[in-house]
Image: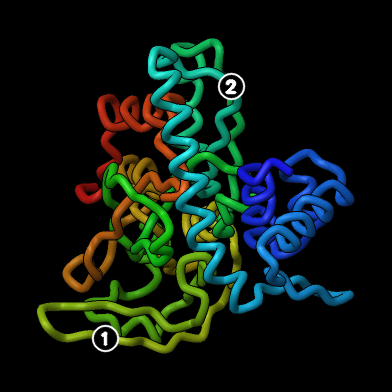
């Protein structure tokens, strides 16, 4: 038994919470994965995983061993990286996840420039507003907007964006412009659920926080749909500044209640701490940092 390989397989099973998904990720057969984990348990003389017909869970011994196995895997990867230090040109598959609208508008052009600069890289850009699990899904890095909650990820700040309330001039011609958050209760509200999952918008001014409960006229999980309806005069919506920067610049939408906006949200590139920053990830991060600071604070 190759103990390093067996430990790596065990870590994959623990991360994927199953033998079959780990096998798919490792491109091994489920039986091979099962054999390696069983051999590791026999070698250690302890059961690492508790198997049922529906789930795979860590035993107490398995949880303790997992932490050490991760460190060993990282040390091995670092040793291999040091031995191949001369290989500094990005190669291989580079998978990047990003939010749908931000990815389409701002990340996709950088990915094109990156692939043109490094022709040995095969790029994969995954756009979606769900929070992908980088380790389980084999994703190298992700662009994320907002406070980072997952402490297992390393983050590099690449910009910031405001949360803005906007409406079309044609809508404001028919409705009195709100001067305070409370006045939004008298307006037709478009709720963009990916930003505001519940019909309650939050504002701040100085030390005071405002929470305004609303009755939306239109609810959607699509930023494009919310913004499009607002541009047609359908109501007031809260979105991220980068999503409406062009519409505000061309006066199709106007920013409201800017004095009550909460602090800007950071825009970050994140990657797992369990992985070394490979040449392909480092090159992409450096390209973003040097050519495209994503600042959407001044509209």
Cα separation, mark 2 vs mark 1, equals 49 Å
Of marks 2 and 1, which one's residue comes earlier in the chain?
2
Name the image quarter holding residue 283.
Answer: top left
- Judging by the rendered image, the residue that carries numbered circle 2 is 92
Q: Nearer the viewer, residue 186 or 27?
A: 27
Residue 74 lies, in percent from the top left, at: 46, 44
Residue drawn at x 20%, y 48% as measured from the top left: 298
Q: Does residue 121 appear left or right of residue 183 in this picture?
A: right
Question: Is 242 rendered above or below residue 183?
Answer: above
Name the image quarter holding residue 220.
Answer: bottom right
Question: Is 74 rendered above or below residue 169?
Answer: above
Question: Is 222 rendered above or below residue 206?
Answer: above
Name the image quarter holding residue 16.
Answer: bottom right
Residue drawn at x 46%, y 25% as measured from the top left: 280
Disc 2, SS: strand
Q: Does residue 260 appear left or right of residue 18 in this picture?
A: left
Q: Can see residue 43?
A: yes
Q: Does residue 77 appear left or right of residue 169 in this picture?
A: right
Residue neighbourhood size for the residue with mark 1, other residues' Cα within 10 Å, grouped as few (<14), some (14–19), many (≥20): some
Disc 1, SS: strand
Residue drawn at x 44%, y 42% as measured from the top left: 75
Residue 278 lies, in percent from the top left, at: 44, 30
Residue neighbourhood size for the residue with mark 2, other residues' Cα within 10 Å, grouped as few (<14), some (14–19), many (≥20): few
The mark lying in front, picked from 2 and 1, is 2
Q: Can see residue 110?
A: no
- Judging by the rendered image, the residue that carries numbered circle 1 is 210
The image quadrant where one finds the N terminus is: top right
Q: Tell me whether the residue at label 2 lies in contact with that at label 1, contact meaning CB atoms closer than 8 angstroms.
A: no
Q: Nearer the viewer, residue 280 or 180?
A: 280
């Amino acid at each position: 038994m190759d103990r390093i390989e067996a430990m790596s397989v065990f870590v994959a099973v623990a991360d994927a919470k199953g033998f079959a998904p780990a096998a798919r990720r490792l491109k091994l057969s489920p039986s091979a994965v099962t054999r390696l984990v069983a051999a590791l348990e026999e070698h250690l003389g302890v059961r690492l995983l508790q198997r049922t017909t529906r789930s795979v869970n860590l035993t107490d011994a398995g949880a303790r061993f997992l932490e050490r196995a991760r460190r060993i895997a990282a040390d091995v990867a670092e040793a291999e990286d040091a031995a191949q230090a001369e290989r500094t040109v990005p190669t291989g598959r580079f998978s990047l996840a990003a939010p749908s609208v931000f990815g389409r508008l701002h990340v996709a052009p950088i990915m094109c420039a990156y692939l043109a600069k490094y022709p040995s890289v095969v790029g994969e850009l995954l756009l979606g507003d769900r929070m992908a699990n980088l380790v389980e899904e084999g994703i190298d890095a992700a662009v994320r907007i907002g406070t980072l909650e997952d402490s297992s990820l390393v983050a590099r700040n690449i910009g910031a964006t405001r949360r803005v309330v906007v409406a079309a001039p044609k809508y404001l011609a028919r409705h009195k412009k709100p001067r305070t958050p409370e006045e939004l209760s008298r307006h037709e509200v478009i709720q963009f659920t990916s930003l505001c999952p519940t019909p309650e918008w939050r504002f701040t001014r100085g030390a005071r926080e405002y929470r305004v409960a609303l009755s939306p006229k239109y609810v959607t999980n699509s930023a494009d749909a919310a913004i499009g309806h607002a541009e047609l005069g359908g109501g007031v919506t809260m979105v991220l500044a980068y999503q409406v920067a062009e519409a505000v610049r061309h006066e199709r939408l106007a920013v409201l209640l800017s004095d009550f906006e909460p602090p800007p949200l950071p825009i970050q590139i994140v990657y797992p701490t369990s992985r070394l920053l490979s040449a392909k990830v480092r090159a992409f991060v450096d390209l973003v940092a040097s050519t495209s600071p994503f600042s959407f604070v001044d509209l």
